[in-house]
Image: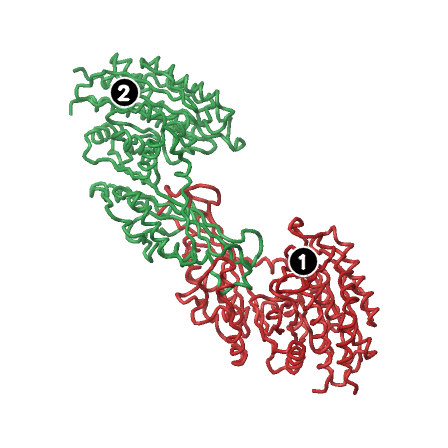
Chain colours: A red, B green
Amino acid sequence: MTDYLPAVLDAIDHNREAALARLFEVLRIPSVSTDPAYKESCRATAEWCVATLREIGFEADLRETSGNPIVVAHDGPADGAGKPHILFYGHYDVQPPDPLDLWTKPPFEPWLDLEPGNGDVIVARGAEDSKGQFSTILEALRAWKQVAGELPIRVTVLIEGEEESDSPSLPEFLARHGSEITCDLAFICDVVQWDKDTPAITVRLRGIVGLEVVLTGPSRDLHSGQYGGPALNPIRELVNVLADLHDADGRVAIPGFYDGIEPPPPDQKKQWQALDFDTDGFLGDVGLTVSAGEKGYSALEQLWERPTCEFNGITGGYQGVGSKTIIPSRASAKITCRLVAGQNPEKILDSLQSFIQSRVSHDCKVEFLDKGDAGLSSEDEVFSFETRVKVASRKAFSADPQSPYLKAAAAALEEEWGRPAVFMGSGGSIPIVSSLSRMLGMECLPIGFGLDDDRIHSPNEKYNLKSFQKGARSWARIIGRLARPA
Amino acid sequence: MTDYLPAVLDAIDHNREAALARLFEVLRIPSVSTDPAYKESCRATAEWCVATLREIGFEADLRETSGNPIVVAHDGPADGAGKPHILFYGHYDVQPPDPLDLWTKPPFEPWLDLEPGNGDVIVARGAEDSKGQFSTILEALRAWKQVAGELPIRVTVLIEGEEESDSPSLPEFLARHGSEITCDLAFICDVVQWDKDTPAITVRLRGIVGLEVVLTGPSRDLHSGQYGGPALNPIRELVNVLADLHDADGRVAIPGFYDGIEPPPPDQKKQWQALDFDTDGFLGDVGLTVSAGEKGYSALEQLWERPTCEFNGITGGYQGVGSKTIIPSRASAKITCRLVAGQNPEKILDSLQSFIQSRVSHDCKVEFLDKGDAGLSSEDEVFSFETRVKVASRKAFSADPQSPYLKAAAAALEEEWGRPAVFMGSGGSIPIVSSLSRMLGMECLPIGFGLDDDRIHSPNEKYNLKSFQKGARSWARIIGRLARPA
């Protein structure tokens, strides 16, 4: 079997200017999904994706949804002969460009700039998130097709247009087209690498469960003179129960909260320690000096390895200026727990509710709200699927450290970048990872070439030219590696 | 010395219809002080008071303020020969009548109604609060003048027109006219009696101190995935410190909080126990079943005798519908403490601030707001007086149980009602009591004939005809008692 990879990499290098011109072309279409005024631009961007994929040689088309259309494309040998069928996921929609006056030039007129420390950077809304990122994939696919005539493995491309709007059409789309989309492996390009010289694979993502607790004491707001003493104050009930949710060491006190947690493998932990994470800089950026998390863990471990219980909002009683001497009728708090691998979201939600219920006084009524669930109707034909997606999306993600695909991707990244890929964690969630892995049973590998300083969602969003070029080369190598016999 | 009292009481009884006609006359003037549309009606009411007092025989006039005018009147022997010079305080302004559609008839067209359990009742806005209440005083003074030709003691009457609007003009007025207003004893008529058959003197009023605490953690709201763990959450700091403010027995944990408390005399406590206060009914009215206050005290004792620390409002993070996964930058709470006799408001405020300050984490910034103080300017000529009033108004009020005036008033009430006056407490504050007692050094006796079911501030406000008639007789007896040699 011919080793096309060196020629593929050469093609990518020789096509740099044309690749950049193609990226600039799609960056000029203002595909803001959160603003209906850009609806036609979103469609035009989807059509650009279809045309580009067809030009590369894909069988591509545009699938209608109740929102923006989704682009689906296939190519490569139908019979993989033991080689994996892979999915690339990206999104063509972008964040709104506001505030416009903070941009150096108009956000949809991409330009190159020279930035100290970053070299040449591509600046535009979407330059990284994710038009730049998925263009690295398109360029790798184009080079493979151009050099080898065909892809060495079967590839499906899925590019949605509502990621910045919480992907409302995607669950129904996956429910209806799951069999077409299901592959052995999905690459999610919407992530960062460790730093500008070090590639990464995101191997851990935290899950999340949450609820709003509403406590009601007296049937109306009371005069604190006329009732103060005998009358139950629901704010006092609320602060008592919330204060009990953590112990003095910052551990979460919900019974069973830490049950089943799967710690990262020792070699991952060793790699993390060697990263020399800049805790002072991380905290100093947001005005803090001391890590406030669970005792016995570094800041990086707290983010990547440990679950949390956070209070996102609290409300009760008088909210205006000055004083109003009432004992309020109600008080409420919004609570979310970030979960890690091995934790059972449903059990934790149940245990949290029991914890609260058992601690409030007899006269205090407890209600739990979960607006996420409340939005689902059993009349809806996709109800059961959405519910399963929702439940699944609460779980944490953890890549299998023994996966041959993970090892192949890591080896390809190390070849391109000259240093091992960091097996990163991330404190947040990526809903598509949960949907694809838990619902469609696909192995997921979040790999991208973004950097923390790319200013995504902010003015002057950028993507390093180096990220764009080495990103495409990295994907070319990953495709090559996956095509090799194991 | 002639005993005019029997004839004075007879005169009150014979003048019932005329007295009621006079009350209806003043009830027809819509003196709502909170709404500028009624400004001229307020002035007309003040003028009605001046005219009425002159007709009785007082030297009366109307004093301009920056708000509604204040009525001041004097009569009686200038040289008291050992008899007290007394002040009667009332207010001629009323609450807005809204919601109008819940009134049986128009609120400023007074009428008589027959109510089961209450007999004939006078219904109108202000029927009790306080046009009805101060009219009992005017009728007693009128009868004394009519029968005896002159009052047996010197009397000053002060009727303000902004009590329902927090008396903004009163502090400056008292600062400028303090020597004219200062008497040996002030009667505050703006209170209730124990029940419709039992008179009362309010001998204890709680004081109040308060502040708003604002905690700031991160310099901006953070993503709870990207920062959750290491980042300090100010809501968690706030609930921890607020939860520490009470112990498991409902006692306030602020150091020194209970220092110096002067418990009520044993005979007062004995009287309270005999009252058989309906705790179940009191709590049941507002949807509660169990007294939530300090262990070891009855609900009535908690209200009348014990201080509190209440959370009037709490705010932090996301306040909208559903979920937003942030760690907020700020969280705040409004706290007020109701104080009892002997507690030092300034020390408690200092101790509360130290308590909070000492408990928050290093990275958590603490600010204390007191909008009440912030509204005072040192450029203001009445600054020092207002500050003193403010500080004074924070202290609790407690009548001297050995006062000969208290004993005389109690004896007079018992003569009229045929049963001893209850020496009541009240959980709230009456700012004028603090101003007169602490600032002008006057002894204060809050005595009134209102009832808890008078619907003050609500539609169909009423005053029992019996309250109106026996109220006037009670004042006539009190004046007679105070005129007797001790």
Give residue A256's position: percent from left, percent from top: 47, 71
Q: Quadrant of the C terminus of chain A?
A: bottom right
Q: Quadrant of residue A361?
A: bottom left
Q: How dense is the environment of label 1, judged by Cα within 10 Å: few (below 14), some, or many (20 and up)?
A: some
Q: Chain of mark 1?
A: A
* Type of the residue with mark 2: Val
Give residue A15's position: percent from left, percent from top: 79, 70
The residue positioned 28% from the left and 27% from the top of the image is: B186
Residue mark closest to the camera, 1 vs 2: 1
Whether residue A298 is visible, yes or no, is yes
Q: Secondary structure at mark 2?
A: strand
* Type of the residue with mark 1: Ser
The residue positioned 66% from the left and 51% from the top of the image is: A98
Q: Chain of mark 2?
A: B
Query: Number of callouts in the render?
Result: 2
Q: Secondary structure at mark 1?
A: helix
Q: Is residue A262 left or right of residue B396?
A: right
- Taking depth in this image into account, of A118 and A184 the one nearest to the observer is A118
- Taking depth in this image into account, of A99 and B309 the one nearest to the observer is A99
Dot 1 and dot 2 within a common chain: no
Give residue B306's position: percent from left, percent from top: 29, 46
Mark 1 = which residue?
Answer: A165
Q: How dense is the environment of label 2, judged by Cα within 10 Å: few (below 14), some, or many (20 and up)?
A: many
The residue positioned 60% from the left and 74% from the top of the image is: A203
Whether residue B284 is visible, yes or no, is no
- Taking depth in this image into account, of B400 and B370 the one nearest to the observer is B370
Q: CA distance from mark 1 to mark 2?
A: 75 Å
Q: Quadrant of residue B446?
A: top left
Which numbered tag is attached to residue B155? Answer: 2
